[in-house]
Amino acid sequence: MMRPLLLATALLVTGACGSGTPHGASGPRPTIATTRTTATATYAPATGTSSTGAAGSAPAQRTEPSLPLPIQEAAATTAGNRLWVAGGYDRARNSSAAVFVFDGSTWTSGPPLPIAVNHPGAATINEDIYVAGGFTPAGATNRVFELARGATAWREVASMRRARGALSLVTGGGRVYAIGGRDGDRQMAVAETYEPQRNTWSDLAPMPD
C-alpha cells in the first residue's frame, strides 16, 4: 500500500527564467544545459507521523524515478496522493501537452492537455486539477483547463481575464488564484480569482509592483 503523499516537488531543468528576457513567441527559447530531469518526493508513513526520521533530525530527501521524458518549465501539483506534471518544454524545446503522474513508485501518462503550453500554472481544489495560462507558440494564453476527479479528459472552463505565463496558481477557500506572471514583455500586477461554482474570474487588488 502506498504511503500517503505529504509533499512532492518536481525538480525540473530550468531555462532563462529571471533573466528579464520575455518568454513566449517574442522571446528566445531557453538554453537547456542538460537533458537529465529528476523528480523527488518526501512521504509520511502510513501512520500519519512526520517524515523527520530520528528525533530532531531534518526531513530526508531521496532520489525517485526520473520522468519518462526530459521536461522543463512545466507546472506541478498534487491530487489523490499523486504528483501531476503538466506542459513545459520537451527535449526539442517545443511546448508540450504531455501530462505525467507519479504514484510514489511509477510514472504514467495522464490525459494530455488540449493545447501545448510552457510555463503554465497548476493547482488543485480537493482532487480537481486546474492548469491555467502559460505560453504557446503564439504567445501568452489566458485559457484554463480542469481535470475533475476521476475524469479521463480535460475540460475548458472560463478563461482568465488576462493572458499570462510564468504565473503562480494557488488555491484557497474553494477558489483558484492567478498571481503575477507576464504577457510578452509586460509584468502582471493584477491578480485574479476563479470561482468554480460560478465559472467566473474576477480581479483582485493589484500588487504594488
Image (cartoon, rainbow, N blue to C red):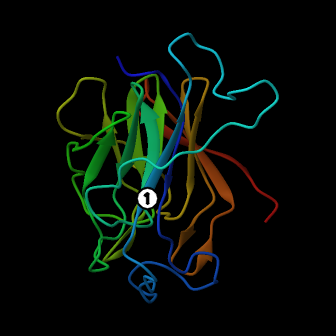
Q: Please tell me whether mark 1 sits on a helix, a strand or a loop.
A: strand
Q: Amino acid at mark 1?
A: Thr
Image quarter of residue 148: top left
Could you tell me if residue 150 is visible in this image?
yes
What quarter of the picture does the C terminus occupy? bottom right
Residue depicted at x 39% and y 24%: 80
Q: For the N terminus, which image quadrant?
A: top left
- In the image as oriented, which residue stretches furthest toward the left? 152
Task: Answer above or below: position of 36 versus 145.
Answer: below
Q: Is residue 65 left or right of residue 53?
A: left
Q: Which residue is at a point 38% across and 22% down the rendered structure image?
A: 2
Image location (x, y in percent) of residue 49: 64, 15
* Residue positioned 56% across, 24% down in the render: 44
User: 95 left or right of 177?
Assistant: left
- Residue 129, image x and y in percent? 39, 35
Q: Residue furthest front?
A: 54
Residue found 25% across the figure and 51% down from its top: 113
Above or below, 56 relative to 116? above
Q: Is residue 90 above or below residue 149?
A: below
In the rendered structure, the answer to whether residue 205 lies left or right of residue 92 reads right
Mark 1 lies on residue: 38
Q: Nearer the viewer, residue 70 or 99?
A: 70
Residue 119 placed where, x, y %?
45, 64
- Against 9, residue 28 (above or below) is below
Q: Is residue 6 left or right of residue 12?
A: right
